[in-house]
Image: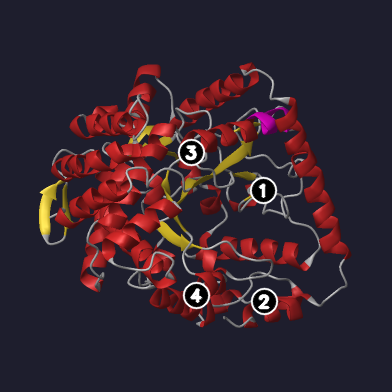
Amino acid sequence: MFDLAERRLSRLARLDADCLRGGGRGVEKESLRVTPEGRIARTPHPAALGAAVAHPWITTDYSEALLEFVTPPLDTNWATLQFLCDIHQFVYPRLPDNEALWPTSMPCAVGGDESVPVAEYGSSNVGRMKHIYRLGLGYRYGRVMQTIAGVHFNYSLPEAFWSALGESEGRDSADRNFRDEMYFGLLRNFRRYGWIVMYLFGASPAVCKSFLGGRDPGLPSFDRATWYGPYATSLRMSDLGYRNTNQAGIQLSMNSLEEYIDGLEHAIRSPWPPYEKIGVAPGGQWRQLSTSALQIENEYYGYIRPKQPIRPGERPTLALRRAGVAYAEVRALDVSPYDPAGVSQNELRFLEALLVFCMLHDSPPLGAEEVAQLDANHARVAVSGRDPALVLDIAGQHRPLAAWGRELCRQLAPVCELLDRGDPARSYSAALELQADKVKDPGLTPSARILAEMREEGESFFGFAMRMSRQHADYFAALPPMSAGRLAEFEAEAAQSHEAQRELEDAPPEPFEDYLARYFAAPGS
């Protein structure tokens, strides 16, 4: 079944055994700021961290309290994780009022939508657009839903890989169409096999009852404060979280870049009756950017996205149309409560190997029937991934999850061997062995460990998260001081972001309505 991936990998190893060395690896990690009592912070974004509208590494996501840490693309996973840890070490002592960072994807101690402050970005048109977009998300999906945190992994293949692959395939390695085709093959195969990421790294098997505001999710009670799934891996990725029924009618094709862009453009320009009822700015009070199915491209939630860095004022679809796919953004990772930075090198190594495999493996177009099967697989794994009887449907084959998982780990082994070239520690192979152990024993998965600890400690999900939050704060407080050079770099970036915000706000005024119309009318190239 995986013969093409094996042949391609063998040819790459003969042409250039170091072809997978380098490339770009970046992480985006979200964390809620919480009070010492574990409630969502109501304080403004700390000025000492910089201006959220303009800082490249420290910003906010939906809420003023939902921090987002963004690393630049770096050429090793070690460097990426070190940069992420540096951001944490810079942030912790600058949090106000003894606040901490929440260590899990699912929030707790939520007092309804009114307890969630929407992120503010200042008075510039750029800042207003960011804020109004978030207001729209609140009206459409509820503010509490937007407090769910996650980790994104951004990955681009190195130039040496493209050179070797182009020679192997008889294609021009610089041809944009060739690269777009290969990246979209990766995207489709991640739809097929990405369920293993939820199984291995899902860390949200329980949810605070306050998150659901009194609604019964159809799950058993762990205690009076916690719902849980006995076999759940990632409730964040279930119907309780980001697998939201509001977007069920939006299906984007991953069969080509053009089809993907056309689908996004159609959703951005197609009115949606439920959102028309909300209105755009009734009585002059803005509620959302538009009444379309999507306000902007980023509203669509997918497990993985094709990405191209955007220019100032450029929409993501136009960037893709202009320059093609530059990297893949994996959005399926829960925040890991067992890692102070929310993610580990072993996760990143496994993900990298999986993405390489997904690009090299045969990837036929996805039809509507297969897409429905794959979505059902993801839903099953999110809610019941550790059930020994769970069966998945892939490529017309029905097999137990454990059998599929073992087969995938076998196929990733030669990818890890190539990634390990020159590394006596065989770091990628070691990371794969750890994940293979989880496939053999579901009790080793983070989701199982969390529930086991909660039982052993006699604590709710809230109690577990509070304990881990204190441990993470203690971890970063105990680290040696950040180097003077790196500290100066972070302080300079914070200062520059405030200056950039002032420049945005001091620019010649333009009516917001005109700015918005110009943004959406910008032609592609």
x then y, percent, for residue 373: 22, 62
Which quarter of the figure has residue 233? top left
Which quarter of the figure has residue 203? top left
Q: Which residue is mark 3?
A: 76
Q: How many marks?
A: 4
Residue type pointed to by label 1:
Thr
Q: Which residue is mark 2?
A: 519
Residue type pointed to by label 2:
Tyr
- Structural crowding at the residue carrying mark 1, measured as other residues with C-alpha within 10 Å and reported as few (<14), some (14–19) or many (≥20): many
Q: Which residue is mark 4?
A: 293
Q: Secondary structure at mark 4?
A: loop
Q: Which residues are magenta?
A: 89-94
**Residue at (86% x, 57% y) in the render:** 502
Q: Which residue is mark 1?
A: 59
Against 364, residue 10 (above or below) is above
x then y, percent, for residue 359: 31, 56
Q: Secondary structure at mark 2?
A: helix
x then y, percent, for residue 257: 41, 73
Q: Secondary structure at mark 3?
A: loop
**Residue at (24% x, 72% y) in the render:** 367
Of the two numbered discs 2 and 3 on the same chain, state the one appearing first in sequence.
3
User: Which sits in the foreground, 329 or 126?
Assistant: 329
